[in-house]
Image: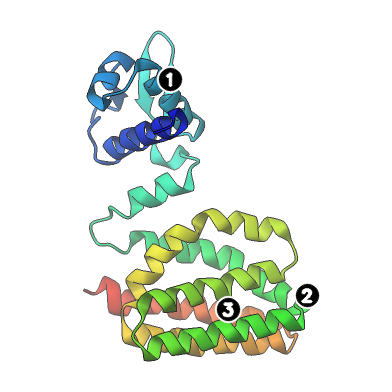
Amino acid sequence: MTRENLVDATATQLLDRILAGDFESGALPNQDTLARECGVSRLTVREAMKGLEQRGIIRVEHGVGTFVVPVDHWRDIDAIARLQRLDPNGTGVSAQLIEVRRMIEIGAAELCAVRRSDDLVDELGACVARMEAAAHEDDVAGFVDADIDFHDAILRGTQNPFVAAIFDPMRSTLEFSRTQTSSVGQIRTNAIVQHHGVLDAIAARDPDAARRAMTSHMDQTQNDLDTYVASR
């Protein structure tokens, strides 16, 4: 294992311990202790901790100690998502993602309808066709891939690179969330109907209709989460 990989692995190990609540007091042991516990050098621990500090997960107070930062101050999407996936009811991360998606994707659909190309419409149509095929085969993973690709295409279709860049770090979390919900057949059926509505509005270059269609899709997604997943 290269030094860089060893540092990353150590940082992940420390993060897992933070998520597991191993440091209940909020304070981490000193670097010598952590090095022994992780089976690595003190230098590796120091570099791993520096990475966690840059991600806003811990703070180092020189001469005092190292402390876990409150979650609402974390700046790392992956770490936040990993924590939320530990939610005992299993739906917390999905509900929070829907809130974020509302803020971004409704406006993105509206802008995409104005700026979209014919190739993009073809791509969106192909994604929906893949969703339908996967649903027919009860292929949840294939359905989720096509679903996320559909939304990625809309973000790209805004022709604003910041929009897609903001969402890219969330893809793995979306895959987790969509796998959770798309395992239910009725949710897949509902999603296909909603995606057709969004596709038709974008194809028609109707920004108002695209906004309404994506709002309807988010509403349906929240309703499906409440009805078929949270209730279980």
Which residue has dot 3 on it? 214
Q: Residue at x 45, y 23 (%)?
A: 47
Label 2: which secondary element: helix
Which residue has dot 2 on it? 115
Cα–Cα gap, marks 1 and 2: 47 Å
Above or below 224: residue 17: above
The disc at residue 60 is 1
Q: Quadrant of residue 111?
A: bottom right
Label 3: which secondary element: helix
Residue 106 appearing in the image:
no
Q: Earlier in the sequence, mark 1 or mark 2?
A: 1
Q: Residue at x 40, y 8 (%)?
A: 63
Residue 118 appearing in the image:
yes
Tell me the kind of residue under disc 1. Val
Q: Residue furthest front?
A: 1
Tell me the kind of residue under disc 3. Met
Cα–Cα gap, marks 3 and 1: 43 Å
Number of on-image labels: 3
* Quadrant in which the C terminus appears: bottom left
